[in-house]
Amino acid sequence: MNYYLAMIIGFFILFFCIFIADFFFVKLKYYRRVTGKSKKKKKKDKELMELSYLISKFNLDKSKLPLKLVLLIISLINSFIISLVAITVIILHTYIILQLLLGFILLLALIYSLYEIYGRYLVKKGYCQDIKNDKKKKVK
């Protein structure tokens, strides 16, 4: 019982540490660069892979998205995925090949499912591009 309690506590500590590192060091720099608050100007603006995936797959309008909230939720999703996969692999006491295989399968399944759920949530909230207006603008 104490072993599993220690794993749950370890999960939350790992989740918190990864969230802090992911959000404040990576996503916040991206947010500053996009909003123009960065002191350094990059020649080529790099877009976050997660954000570009959501925008292209669900046909989202980037100008309608609340960028800071989206980056926060993306950081939470990434932290949850990394923490859950790490703790699951640590709990298993099997061969290293099986741990790696299970971790890889679990990682891909969580990435796909959680980003799919979040993308559908954004579409339901109305952040998708208005296709009818775009077609009318192109015709005129």
Image: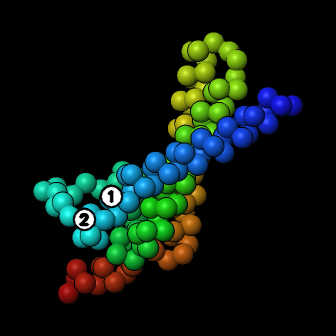
**Lower sequence index among marks 2 and 1:** 1
Q: Nearer the viewer, residue 63 or 67?
A: 67
Q: Nearer the viewer, residue 131 or 116?
A: 116
**Position in image of residue 77 (x %, y %):** 55, 52
**Position in image of residue 106 (x %, y %):** 59, 35
Q: Is residue 116 left or right of residue 42?
A: right
The answer to whether residue 97 is seen in the rendering is yes
Residue 72, above or below 91? below
Residue that mark 1 sits on: 29
- Check whether the beta carbons of the residues at disc 2 and disc 1 lie within 8 A of each other: yes
Residue that mark 2 sits on: 38
Q: Secondary structure at mark 1?
A: helix
Quadrant position of residue 128: bottom left
Residue 129, above or below 1? below
Identity of the amino acid at label 1? Lys
**Position in image of residue 28 (x %, y %):** 38, 60
Q: What residue is at 48 percent from the left and 68 percent from the top? A: 69
Q: Secondary structure at mark 2?
A: loop
Q: Is residue 9 left or right of residue 41?
A: right
Which of the image's four quarters has the C terminus?
Answer: bottom left
Q: Nearer the viewer, residue 13 or 62?
A: 13
**Position in image of residue 122 (x %, y %):** 51, 68
